[in-house]
Image (cartoon, helix red, strand yellow):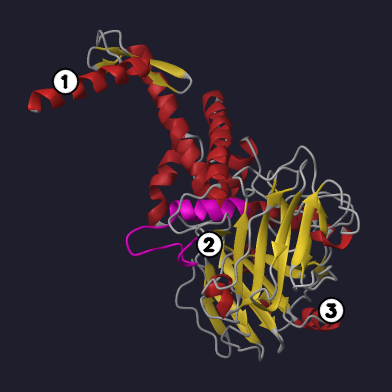
Amino acid sequence: MKNKCQIILAVISLLLCFGCKESTIKNPDTAVVSQPGSEIKMDGELPSKESVSLLFDEMDTQQATQCYLWGLPIVAFAEWQYQHYKTFNASSNDLVLYNTYDDRLGILTANATTPYIMTFIDLAANGPTVIEMPAGRTAGGLADFWQREQATIGEMGPDKGKGGKYILVPPTLKDFKADGYFIVPCNTVNMFFGFRALDPDPKTTETLLKQVKIYPYAQRANPTPTKVVSPPVGKKWLGIQPSGIAYWERLHAILQNEPVEERDRFFMAWLKNLGIEKGKPFAPDERQKKILILGAEKGQQMAMANSFEKRFAAVKHWPDKKWDYVMILSDPSQRTANYDEFFERSSYFYEAVTYSKAMMTKIPNVGQAYLGAYFDNNGNWLDGSKNYTLNIPANPPAVNFWSITIYDSATRCLIDNPQKNADLSSRKDLIKNADGSVDLYFGPKAPEGKEKNWVQTLPGKHWFTYMRFYGPTKAYFDKSWKMDDIKEVK
């Protein structure tokens, strides 16, 4: 039996060698190991002299792809902040109101149902900064530039919806104290603040918005009034991670202002090899430029795979369906007992921005729940040239409302279609079936008589969708309510 097993293993080994030409070594002095874009020759047991530089290129390229994934959350915020300051002419102490469909076209996976009110605050320019929130039904929060939730503001925050004054304290300033304020020690110099009014009446939102104040603590005696700014009408913009060398320019710029955390010191060493260093200008040589461009291209391809075909455990809400949990980080801190969630973080922040405990609620009837679909029921990417349908069974598990929103796979932003509509929701006048269910339609042309239940997709572009439940009920968590996959209509 022993000899028989040895013979079988020898045959398998021989077959594997025939199937893998690169691994067949006849002469160690001339052996070639296949490497992406290069051939590495060996001189005995060592790389040949001419192959050493190729190995360094390969090492730096691999590190560039991982630095691309690592930088996704901070580059997304940095680019969006740049659009606020340069395109919208908003300052660190202004609020930006995203109220219309066109306003939200440049935001990563924005919802198309409720207004957004947001700003980016530069604590290097401001020093400690005050946010005055009025009393009222609001839900908001603060996040650092790695998109970790720092504080909740509004009904779920320490002011309990009664209003209050918050102070954002830069990481460089320790032991800051001020009576009568909620103190928020910040991890990063740049901070994100966003909130929404929970009352559906737009007049209530307008009233609340006018009462919010943002100003440097040093100017508290006579603060400059906070302005409300809107994105410029008719001007295209994208607050997403840029491509190519622009990605690294934005990363370099934001890293100049932010502290280096212990978890990130190895990444900073990798970036140094690529010409990106704190305290030094961004001036990569030609070799580094080529590697950075290739690293951004390959890194983005990895990000797409990591986001759109998630390989995380228990990622499906219903094991036999294609609907993924969008909120895959175990905690807004992005940290577990033994590691930081690198791949989960990269997956989520490639396709979305902001993350909070309210968005990953486990308590029925509060917060939100998100499911994402990237494939049809046959496992094919969702294609803008094809027609699809989705049945929403009766009694969807949402106390407040549900919505389904269509995104362009390339930009991860709302689909920019001639219809000027990217979502269908229980807040819209949809055609219902006799059993209370709703059939939705996605495709280049509306099915006759079903225009109310249709979102227009674009031929030549792939798309994906988020299903949001606002105030998810027990039926969502125990999965007693079940939704089918998106199906192609031939």
Side of 384 where 417 appears, left or right? right
Q: Is 333 colored magenta in this rendering?
A: yes
Q: Nearer the viewer, mark 3 or mark 2?
A: 2
Q: Secondary structure at mark 3?
A: helix
Which quadrant of the view contains residue 441?
Answer: bottom right
Residue type at the position of mark 3: Pro
Instruction: Find the magenta span and give its range.
Output: 327-352
Q: Earlier in the sequence, mark 3 or mark 1?
A: 1
What residue sits right under mark 3 in the picture?
202
In this view of the protein, can residue 312 be seen by the observer? yes
| Residue under the image location 48 percent in, 43 percent down | 67
The residues bearing labels 3 and 2 have C-alpha atoms spaced at a distance of 36 Å
What residue sits right under mark 1 in the picture?
7
Q: Nearer the viewer, mark 3 or mark 1?
A: 1
Q: Are marks 2 and 1 in contact (CB under 8 Å)?
A: no
Q: Position of residue 483 (x, y in %)?
A: 63, 64
Q: Secondary structure at mark 1?
A: helix
Which quadrant of the view contains residue 147?
Answer: bottom right
Q: Earlier in the sequence, mark 2 or mark 1?
A: 1
Q: Position of residue 309 (x, y in %)?
A: 54, 47
Q: Earlier in the sequence, mark 3 or mark 2?
A: 3
Rendered-image quadrant of the C terminus: top right
What residue sits right under mark 2 in the picture?
318
The residues bearing labels 2 and 1 have C-alpha atoms spaced at a distance of 46 Å
Side of 169 where 381 appears, left or right? right
In this view of the protein, can residue 279 be seen by the observer? no
| Residue under the image location 61 percent in, 42 percent down | 247
Rendered-image quadrant of the N terminus: top left
Residue type at the position of mark 2: Trp
Q: Position of residue 231 (x, y in %)?
A: 82, 59
